[in-house]
Image (cartoon, grey):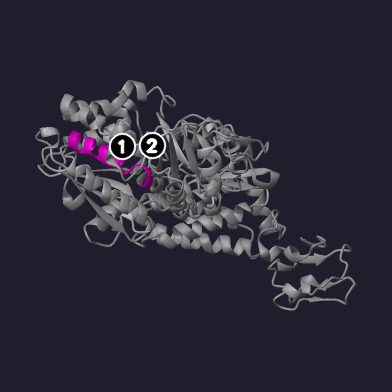
Amino acid sequence: MALVRAHILICTGTGCTASGAKDVLAKFEQELKAKKLWDEVSVVETGCHGFCEAGPLVIIYPEGTFYTRVKVEDVAEIVDEHILKGRVVSRLLFKEPMTSQKVPNYSDIAFYKKQHRLVLGNCGHINPDSIEEYIGAEGYEGLAKAVLTMTPEQVVEEMKKTGLRGRGGGGFPTGMKWMFCAKSPGPKKYVICNADEGDPGAFMDRSLLEGDPHAILEGMAICAYAIGADEGYIYCRAEYPLAIKRLKQAITQAEEAGLLGKNIFGKDFSFTLHIKEGAGAFVCGEETALMASIEGGRGMPRPRPPFPAVKGLWDKPTNINNVETFANVPYIFRVGAEEYAKLGTEKSKGTKVFALTGKINNTGLAEVPMGISMREIIFDIGGGIMDGKKFKAVQIGGPSGGCIPEQLLDTPVDYDSLIAAGAMMGSGGLVVMDEGTCMVDVAKFFLNFTQSESCGKCTPCREGTKRMLEMLIDITEGRGKEGDIEKLERLAKSIKAGALCALGQTAPNPVLSTLRYFRDEYEAHIYEKRCPANVCTAFIGYKITDKCVGCGLCKTVCPVDAISGEPKGKHTIDPEKCIKCGACMVKCPFKAIIRG
């Protein structure tokens, strides 16, 4: 067999696959075989690199050359130029959005420079379907260390020393959670991984499951050893078929290797894992609703206490952590609690993975040390705002989070600082908004989501969010009236105080945070009957200016025949007929149509 002189890593996570990565992979295999290079060049199918905006992604080692947006028709050129002649294909290199500079090596791209890829370290670099590659990257060493050299009590104490807080949104100390479950009496206990990722725009858990499934299995096994559990469930939404496929493969491989199942490492420790596919109910991200779903019931929360650590799945003590939390565990037990605790801030240790979406140049996943500023994430890693527009706000923490304005961009990203700012860490969704965003409309969007996802069990959430949504609809449609702002605030605080679970308790956050920082926009909608961002259609209209040359293109796209005028003469829009769709403004080549 010839010596392998190059490795071609091709991202086949969901994002890159949607852009045609599978076809690119097949074409590489075809070209290499045709040029008799198959024995000299290895093609590795990897998980998500996090840089979803630039996919499909191809990295060639040993150089580390980073090619973006690779199409099938580009493959032959890469093989001919790069593999055979050693010449970089410049046109496929990533171009920095702020400087237009082409960057050949992925480690030099601004998107990656300020990241600390601890949890995402394997994603994009190993084949997620290969347990051998995971083990080659120090996989299962943490489990071996825990089972072979530590008692369960020592494992719990080690977790407490890390300061790791749950990455699913609540931020409860992980070591304390494990301790409570470990101390609960009973011969039967469960470990559950909450992979029911439902926040709009969030895909952190999905990418981890697709790109490094064994890390989650190892983290769960360490937890099981610590608390005395012999059985576990991964609750993953059915909309993640690739994640489920790779998890099933990983479980089978781990069982065959003796890393799951009976008498792991020859010790009196057994752990069996199952996958439960969820139907996509957002409320099932709440741990008691999740357990009800696993048990075959309707996903609805129950009052706490008793907490799951005492009375959880089938009334047995149960520990539940989310995907990212478990993905931290193998690293912790490889390097030790003290080394891990060096990352982050005093009260927020480690790193956090964020899904960057919205009006930002570099969309994708970014893993950063706790304590980094929001400004660094958005402008240094995210590459700034699209089309050179002005930053307005960032929604952090998903639909239950809050909006942070420009004056708070230097806020450290940690649990306590975000709560003080009226937001929350949440699971890691981060939606960036520019100057063209209406903050009242944003609050309405997120409240509409949480209201429709309410399970309906408790009155404050079921009825309260509906009344709040009705008021927001009225405000954005020109029917807002004096006193609505005060009613929204009172109702929001009542829902937070009275709702049964975290969905209801946090649902008013987008409204409260936008009222706190953008109250003037609510007042403009109600008292001045205008939308400052020109987004809410009830307050806007379209008119044709003197730039019009009478070309008639606007008339051809108007769906309601609201535009009239003679050829080569200025046209006009009938405001009574106009449905404010904006098609005419988009079509006009002379920018003669304005909104206002």
- Is residue 144 found inside the magenta-colored segment of the image? no
Density class for disc 2 (Cα within 10 Å; few <14, some 14-19, many ≥20) is many
Front residue of 346 and 278: 278
Residues tagged 2 and 1 counted as in contact (Cβ below 8 A) = yes
Q: Is 298 above or below relative to 429?
A: below
| Quadrant in the picture for residue 8 | top left
Q: Is residue 112 visible?
A: yes
What residue is disc 2 on?
Answer: 122
Q: Amino acid at mark 1?
A: Tyr
Q: Amino acid at mark 2?
A: Asn
User: How far across and how far down the image is residue 285, in percent?
Assistant: 35, 51
- How far apart in space, not on screen, are marks 2 and 1 (Cα)? 8 Å
User: How far across and how far down the image is residue 465, in percent?
Assistant: 46, 59
Q: Which residue is located at x 38 percent, y 53 percent?
A: 499
Name the secondary structure under disc 1. Answer: helix
User: How far across and how far down the image is residue 416, in percent?
Assistant: 45, 33
Segment colored magenta: 210-227
Front residue of 31 and 588: 31
Q: Is 571 above or below relative to 53?
A: below
What residue is disc 1 on?
Answer: 134
Density class for disc 1 (Cα within 10 Å; few <14, some 14-19, many ≥20) is many
Question: Overall secondary structure of the magenta stretch?
Answer: helix
Q: Is 462 above or below relative to 398?
A: below
